[in-house]
Amino acid sequence: MPLSVYMDGQYGINDVFIGTPAVIGRNGIEQIIELPLSDDEAKSMKASSDELKKIIDGAFSKSDIKFRQ
């Protein structure tokens, strides 16, 4: 099922939640399913994750929160 999940190296993406297929079990996300992507799809996914990070970092810089976890 497609979910917004924390990326920890999948598709070369880290430190952001992004939509990707995953398996949900009784205790939450059990597995992120890393599908093969074409070069264009991989570039688009990386561009999306970079844009999300910019938006998140901008929001944190404008708030009283000192760091992201």
Image (tube, rainbow, N blue to C red):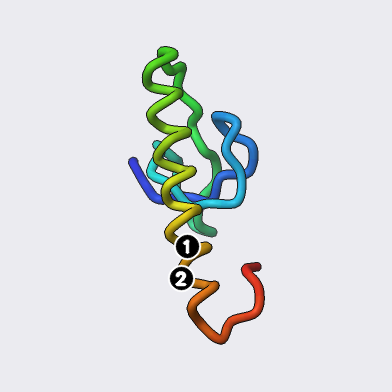
Q: Is residue 55 left or right of residue 9?
A: left
| Mark 2 lies on residue | 59
| Residue 37 appears in the picture as rendered | yes
Mark number displayed over residue 56: 1
Q: Secondary structure at mark 1?
A: helix
35 and 55: which one is in front? 55
Image quadrant in which the N terminus is located = top left
> Is 22 located above or below residue 36 in the figure?
below
Locate residue 28, reporting x and y percent: 50, 57
37 and 64: which one is in front? 64
| Among the 4 quarters of the image, the one containing residue 68 | bottom right
What residue type is disc 1 on? Ile
Furthest-left residue in this view: 1
Q: Secondary structure at mark 2?
A: helix
Locate residue 15, reporting x and y percent: 60, 51
Locate residue 59, reporting x and y percent: 46, 70
21 and 7: which one is in front? 7
| Residue 25 appears in the picture as rendered | no
- Dots 2, 1 in contact, CB < 8 A: yes
